[in-house]
Image: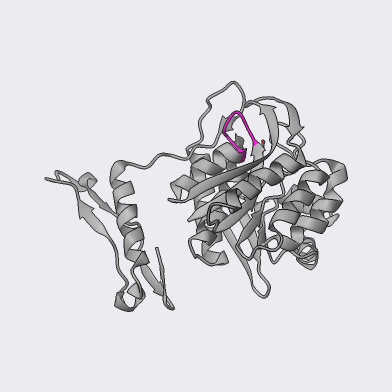
Amino acid sequence: MNILTIAGSDPSSGAGIQSDIKTFSEFGCHGFTAITAITSQNSSKFSGVKPVEANILGQQIDSIFSDFQVNAIKIGMVYDSKIIKIVSKKISKMSIPIVVDPVIKSTTGGELLQKNAIKDFKKFLLPIATVITPNKYELEILSGIKIKNKIILEKAIKKIQKLGAKNVVVTGIFEKNKVSDYVFTANKHFVFSSKKISNQNHGSGCNYSAALIAALAKGYNIRESVQIAKKFAYNSIKNSRKIGRGISLTNIKTPKQESIKLRKSIEKFTMIQNISEHIPECQTNFVYASKKPKSIKNIFGLEGRIVKAGNRVVV
Ligand code: PXL
């Protein structure tokens, strides 16, 4: 699968396009990029931003679409109205999944969306979003509603859906000792919770939305994709590293050679036409041993199983 990220450059590679490319390749997808703005930042300080000229951004997007097949798009930092309008003009007629991550402020306080661009963000980008992934703060800004409890949260989400976003995933709502994501599709609601990791980091939002679009591109439905993205972001926080003087950068652990091989085999398996018909009632799994195994550490397999869902195969 090929995925285009339309986003800002982050020289620390913790967030932005640099991080998105890493996430896409982690999912076995090829990442294309169209850069909207150049930020200057490290783990402690956001020192500046320069948006790319709108026509240059348009050219980047055209260069990709005139040559490659693009299966899905992620939109991250867009910064100003000119950028928002050119993005909308170039992609609004495309019928592929689009995840819009409405980033407004960086962890270190940098402005990623100008205040006077919020109106155009709502007008042009919400209607093209297959999924929008605001955190609580971003939802408050986009809906204009201060979220004090779950009833108000629901009201704010519905307002965003009315503005055109088909599915809304509100990430990172803190509740006692867990952190929950609220998923609203056209007619169903889900809540997914996980343990709270109290670790200030740079990059988890980008990891989440990039993993979400990769899962959607690979054919998982919204519910499955959110679960995949949540786990992916959770692990990237768990493995985050303090590389600089400031906050930690999330870290996508490079998997071992064996797990790459295992994943490739599973991917090939899932691509076989009508393979779901051959998965038994008890479902299936892929497990293998490296040569001359000495302990259980030399056996590789999937956590969980490969299951049949209608005529699809879910790993
Ligand atoms: O995580 C949000 C984000 C997105 N894009 C860029 C960023 C940040 C946060 O700092 O710098 C370019």
Q: In terms of image quarters, where does ligand 1 lie?
A: top right
The residue depicted at 33 percent of the width and 60 percent of the height is 268
Q: Position of residue 90 (x, y in %)?
A: 71, 54
Q: Is residue 207 left or right of residue 261?
A: right
Using the rendered image of the protein, determine whether residue 229 is visible from the camera's viewpoint: no
In the displayed structure, 25 sits above or below 190; it is above
Residue 128 percent across, percent down from the top left: 71, 61
Span colored in magenta: 9-16
Instruction: Please indicate, yes or no, whether residue 289 appears anywhere in the rendered image.
Output: yes
Q: Residue furthest top?
A: 245
Name which quarter of the figure residue 272 lies in: bottom left
Q: Position of residue 85 (x, y in %)?
A: 79, 51
Question: Quick one: 200 or 315, which is closer to the camera?
Answer: 315
Res 35 quadrant in image: top right
**Residue closest to the eye, 298 or 64:** 64
The colour mode here is: one colour
Q: Image point 30% across, 57% down: which residue?
A: 265
Looking at the image, residue 158 sits to the left or right of residue 23; the answer is right
Q: Name the residue at the front extreme.
A: 66
The verdict on residue 12 being magenta is yes
Residue at screen point 60% across, 35% down: 201
Q: Quadrant of the C terminus?
A: bottom left
